[in-house]
Amino acid sequence: MRPFAPIPAGISVILGLVIWYVIPVPTGVSPEAWHLLAIFVATIAAIIGKAMPIGALAIVAITVVALTGVTNPDSPKAAIQDALSGFSNPLIWLIGLAMMISRGLAKTGLGNRIGYGFIAMFGKRTLGVGYALTLAELTIAPITPSNTARGGAILHPIMRSIADSFGSSPQEGTSGRIGHYLALVNYHANPITSAMFITATAPNPLIVDLISKTTGGDFSITWTQWALAALLPGLVALLVMPTVLYFLYPPELKHTPDASRFARGKLDEMGPLSTPEKIMIGVFLLLLSLWAGIPAMLLGPAFSVNATTVALLGLCALLISGVLSWEDVLKEKAAWDTIVWFSALVMMASFLGKLGLISWFSDVIQQGIGSFELGWFGMALALMAVYFYTHYFFASTTAHITAMYGAFLAAGIALGIPTMYIALLLAGASSLMMSLTHYATGTAPIIFGSGYVELGTWWKAGFIMSLINLTIWIVVGSLWWKVLGYW
């Protein structure tokens, strides 16, 4: 990526200046809130336009917030404290720490072993290979908060090696044999698993934070509540997706007994489970049990552990055991980068709420949706649809969520939609919207760039899967959440 792109940078600066100096401050909005919005919109525009690497943009945004004093005009000291306040957010560190832990999947080879293991079991048919990739994606999702690393760096090379073993290559014009189908499955499993766990994609902890801030701290969602809520709709979506894609885009090869043999050969090359892999599995199980609150359920609330503390414990275990070295942690650039840019975006979103801008924006949305008199369920669907399909205009789920989730949640609550219902519906949509385009999230350019799927097919498949996934989340999810007593 270029260190600096003048045209997108110039557009974002002009956009910020127009909001700051040209557009009048609306009635009911303070000048400080409007000026912070100008900085925020300029930052989001720069992220979408890729004016600079996102971490660098975060540093610029933090600096501008501190220099302008929009959060605290009377005290430069307080202004810089506000600008840096995002770094103290435990949820940001949760995602960064979990990304560091997930490095162990690649270093030990456990991620590859899981992928090839499922293919060895289910790979006698092309459809079975699709389900094997889906199961591998689901298995590692809870401890792989970078959906890009999971779908693009771990599973995509496995998918490509399987396609290559059958002579299916974009360069040779043979993608249709099996690679075209497997690439679509490889990608479309990613948004679904991302929706199933707080720790399955980086923006999910941001959603948890926005829920808490939007409701004034009166309402929050735990790791267990999220996982339980997404369990049934997620499993149904994962069950449906490979079959739907199989019939929409049938591969030329239907029977693939060589895939199982190929995968078993790869497993033989890896040999038996190594000690680091066994430790990684133990840490994996420890994290899941503590995040799910199993010790607290069995032994009482005194054994409850904060989710970020659990991540720290897991990283310590890997460091002490030698599975990861401190050098490995330092080299996990994506984690440190995420901590930096998350801190900036969370800080700005937080102060937009404190300064009243989010309340004002949610009132505008509420009035617009409420004027149609659809009933709370119809209004929930309308909010979700607008929120979901505006992702065509975003190249970052984090930017989209930061810009819109809090306001849409506040509008939904004000419209009388049950808080847990609208929070979960929008949370699911926040990951499922990754299916839409070839730039929707970091995984998309990797798999699309491999050349197995042409652009028109990618967009068409993305739209079809968006309708199917949303229908499952609305129908199955709504009924499941009612059974759980969530609304």
Image (cartoon, rainbow, N blue to C red):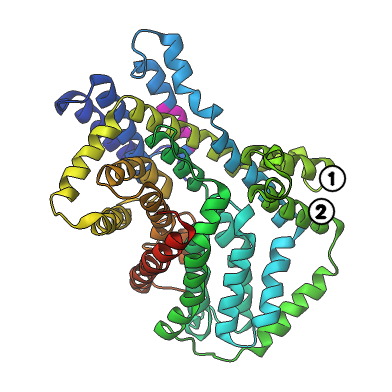
Residue 321, numbered label: 1
Q: Is residue 27 visible?
A: yes
Magenta span: 55-61
Q: Residue 128, how many percent across, how many down?
A: 59, 82
Q: Is residue 59 magenta?
A: yes
User: Label 1 sits on what residue type?
Assistant: Ser
Main secondary structure along the magenta-highlighted residues? helix
Residue occupying the point 31% across, 26% down? 36
How far apart in space, not on screen, are marks 1 and 2 (Cα)?
A: 8 Å
User: Which quadrant of the structure image shows residue 131?
Assistant: bottom right
Q: Is residue 117 magenta?
A: no
**Label 1 or label 2, whichever comes before in sequence order:** 2
Q: Up-down: is 122 above or below 474? A: below
User: Label 2 sits on what residue type?
Assistant: Ile
Q: Up-down: is 135 above or below 279? A: below
Q: Residue 89, how many percent across, how many down?
A: 54, 31
Residue position marked by numbered label 2 in the rendering: 279
Judging depth in this view, the residue of 296 and 291 nearest the camera is 296
Q: Which image quadrant: the C terminus? A: bottom left
**Left or right placement of residue 68 versus residue 80 in this view:** left
Circle 2 sits in a helix, a strand or a loop, which is it?
A: helix
**Left or right placement of residue 124 versus residue 374 in this view:** right
Label 1 with label 2: CB-CB less than 8 Å: yes
